[in-house]
Amino acid sequence: MTIYDIAKKAGVSSATVSRVLNNGTVKTATKKRVLRIIEKENFVPDNTAVYLKKPRTRKIGFIIPDILNPVYPLAVKVIHDILRDRKYQLILGNTYGEIKEERNILDMMQREKVAGIILATSEGEDDSALNPLLENFIKRNVVLVFTGKQKNGLPVDFISIDNFSGMKKATEYLLKTGNKRIGFISGDKNLWVTEKRLAGYIQALKNKNVEIDPDIIITEGQYTMECGEKWGEVLIRKKVDAVVCGNDLLAIGVIKTAGKMNIRIPEELSVTGFDDIPLASLIKHPLTTLRQPFEDASRIACERLIGRIEGRLTEKPVDILMEPELIVRESA
Amino acid sequence: MTIYDIAKKAGVSSATVSRVLNNGTVKTATKKRVLRIIEKENFVPDNTAVYLKKPRTRKIGFIIPDILNPVYPLAVKVIHDILRDRKYQLILGNTYGEIKEERNILDMMQREKVAGIILATSEGEDDSALNPLLENFIKRNVVLVFTGKQKNGLPVDFISIDNFSGMKKATEYLLKTGNKRIGFISGDKNLWVTEKRLAGYIQALKNKNVEIDPDIIITEGQYTMECGEKWGEVLIRKKVDAVVCGNDLLAIGVIKTAGKMNIRIPEELSVTGFDDIPLASLIKHPLTTLRQPFEDASRIACERLIGRIEGRLTEKPVDILMEPELIVRESA
DNA sequence: AGGAGGACTGTAACCGGATACAATAATGAC
DNA sequence: GTCATTATTGTATCCGGTTACAGTCCTCCT
């Protein structure tokens, strides 16, 4: 079933059917007749043909590290909904922190001729290897927005969270509430977020003239609960008063370990997280953490992306850093 | 940049380039030369053209109610990964329980010419209105798999959980541990899962000759934490000993409410859930619930789908109901 | 009535690949 | 060296829409 079949049944040319489908100028009576037939035949045009001819598709790629990290479902939802309202389609890709996967996903998206990509990943120092690929997109007028990594000189919008300031806040809070020996756990040190969050932690300590002890700073592994448990135990054995965690999952892992080791929270160990995932307020020791304005950031990123695609937004690429808010609960 | 450009630069015809891209028979030397140029020019073929000619795409639709429900991220991951390994692409759609949204998503997927769809939704009694649309897919050889609703006579595989048996187990457990007055909370009564889960609850009571009290059976609203809080309060005021919840989110809501009302769990109120979402084991009163073999079910659904698409699987549509496992924790 | 001008419609050329079929080159047997 | 086979390559068409361009048909004036 093609527009030619519809055209024949309606006694018009294919061009007229196409115009009916695209709100071209068609006499009302003709339009009605064609629409009736389209309806009756359950005709739906084939996007592969539509987009072959049109200069751009209405597909947007969204690349995240891992949908199982509870931060991302909300971002996916926000973006999914905006795209739905604007009649765009969402193509989702998980990289699991692997350059190779990211490369595959980008390749796939290029084949699919996406109109834009929201990149929420950051694979560490070696992800500059992806720059040539990304530049390729830009060359072809595919719009990019970054929300999880530095732009490395690429002319793209960058919408993110002020990780430095956030972690500084958390550390300052722990210092203020009397913690002396404060450990730090994050994921891989080469990730942009790790770097910024670690810097915030260090800055807060320096400001109060607290000695920086590399022995209780752990910046390897993933941002997962499992790593939280593992490193949590290590730090507890090193007699820390508090642990600043790079994200909530790590913090929850630390709290789990503390439970197993019969360490009371927050009396014997204070723990802070980062993200304020839905879990954070529901666990046994509700988590003191930094709430990311994730919804707003996703919305802004997505709307700027569409604005650029549709030519409504033409200003030079900007950096927008949003301020996380410290949410004090019971874990610290 | 098209295969024609590549062909010209390589001094071959477009057909040869196409063969290089599709592992056709090409002399090794020629292949090398063409590949070098493809590499140098960063050429990537345009799927809109590829799929215009080919009988089917390598895109699979996955339709879920809401990615924010913690059951779905895992399913998305499992399916995403299988598809990635098999070189298929994932198109995700959230319906939010709305027939209208589901219709839009199905329409979009038809335009995109998906090769198959995994349907994890169930919009209640009126979703039979979607049958004509779904039959349309089948007519066009698009393969469907259902994981969340009855097949309504459609010739499709149905992979799901035995909701009836699961809820019967939970209710029986509550009876065995001495609870007399057991309330029931679920989402909308027209949903297939609700129907089955309610039936399991009723069967368990009947088997023990416990009177069914419609006054403490609530089957409206959504499967959300908020509804759990709302209906939990209602049931607590009606003096129930226990509440069987249609899913974990509802159960967590009930537990939250109980906390606010100073009702001790499980001494004064036992609560069970359904799903065993990641949250279930981490909350203050770890949840007794039914673990769904979600990973396996998603995998089976996805693999059968691909098998049928690729013609490897040709047997008649089957129903596979997997058995949920009762996980006893502290809430009951 | 004769035209001007706009509304509507049709014709045909793309878009960028895949592939049937035809043509040519290479290989091997005798 | 010749010819049958097979391997390799090229030509041309098609996939299903969109759209530039060229009509055709009205409507409304003068």
Image (tube, coloured by chain):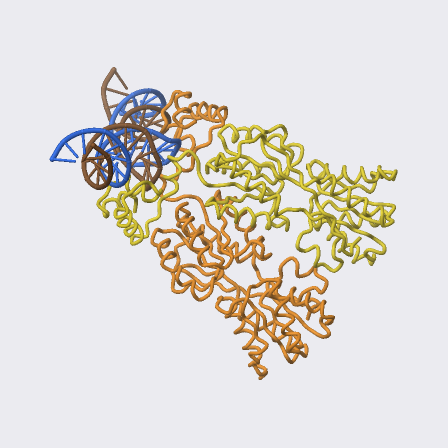
Chain colours: A orange, B yellow, C brown, D blue
Give how far across and how far down residue A13 sits, in percent: 36, 25
Residue displayed at 56% across by 72% down: A218
Left or right? Give the position of C25 relative to B25.
left
Left or right? Give the position of A244 relative to A6.
right
Residue closest to the eye, A228 or B252: A228
Left or right? Give the position of D18 relative to A272.
left
Q: How many marks?
A: 0
Which corner quadrant of the image does residue B146 belong to?
top right
Residue displayed at 55% across by 30% down: B133
Give how far across and how far down residue A45 sits, in percent: 44, 33
Give how far across and how far down residue B332 sits, in percent: 80, 53
Residue closest to the eye, A14 or A249: A249
Give how far across and how far down residue B81 sits, in percent: 52, 49
Which corner quadrant of the image does residue A152 belong to?
bottom left
Residue displayed at 50% across by 41% down: B60
Residue closest to the eye, B60 or C8: B60
Vertical arrangement, residue A316 with respect to residue A59, above or below? below
Vertical arrangement, residue A182 with respect to residue A297, above or below? below
Left or right? Give the position of A168 relative to A311.
right
